Image (spheres, helix red, strand yellow):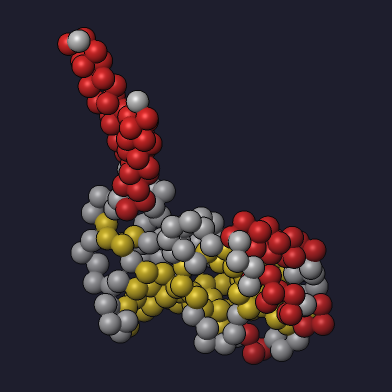
Amino acid sequence: MNNLIITILLLFVLGSSVKADLLPDGKKRISYSFEVTNLDSFPGYTFVAFPINNSNGIPMIFGSVLKSSMNIELPCKFGSPVVYAIKNEDFDGFKFDSLNQISDNNSRSAQLSEFMKKSKFIPSLKITCSSFADRDAKYYYVQELFRIESIDADTMIIRSTKTLYKDTQKNIIDAKDSKGGVKDDIVSPTEKYSSYLLIIIPVLALVAIVSIVLIRKMKK
């Protein structure tokens, strides 16, 4: 009986893994990254992106201080980071760095969130992305460029300026000016994702196991 329970649990876990690795019909997996430009025009401010998830598996949340020419890769899972600005004199960089060093994922995420809430951060753009593109698309990497336009007491204006498409060697093969935040060829995984398989696969596995058990009991 214990073996049966373990088997059922494993099948549910495997069913979840299938969902995580499943590609939408006609799509392939790509890598997404972003860069925020024009930071040097605002020397009195520090810019931070939070939350940054560094994992394709269990969420591993960090905060990141943005620098010029700094490219941040996103798995495009478990939330979208927001770009914040804070005056240099109001930013406790030492504490921010120490919180990022916390080894426990839950504790690190909670304490960073609390730090962001209590500090005088000015929120702006939320970075949204996708890990999928059309299967016949020639690119495998997408890099989106954002530009800081202005900052006042409680508002920061950032806009997407350009999207770079790169091949397997990360050579730029296309570059498109952003129009209203629309990314050509990139489809949100929530739009055409076959999420129903997450339910169907474990249920079918459970039905099969129960059927086998009942058949064996009937034969006795």
Q: Residue at x 60, y 74 (%)?
A: 64
Name the spot of residue 209 as percent of width and height, x first.
27, 26
The picture places residue 108, in percent across and down from the top left corner, at 65, 63
Q: Position of residue 88 (x, y in %)?
A: 77, 83
Q: Compared to 1, does 139 lie above or below? A: below
Indicate whether 76 appears above or below 65.
above
Q: Nearer the viewer, residue 9 or 153?
A: 9
**Residue occupying image coordinates x 34% and y 73%:** 141
Does residue 190 appear to the left or right of 43 in the view shown? left
Note whether 131 is above or below 178 in the view shown.
above
Q: Residue at x 27, y 60 (%)?
A: 28
Q: Nearer the viewer, residue 67 or 15?
A: 15
Image quadrant in which the N terminus is located:
top left
Q: Splitting the image into 4 quarters, where does residue 62 fall?
A: bottom right
Name the residue at 49% across, 67% down: 54
Question: Which quarter of the image is occupied by the C terminus?
Answer: top left
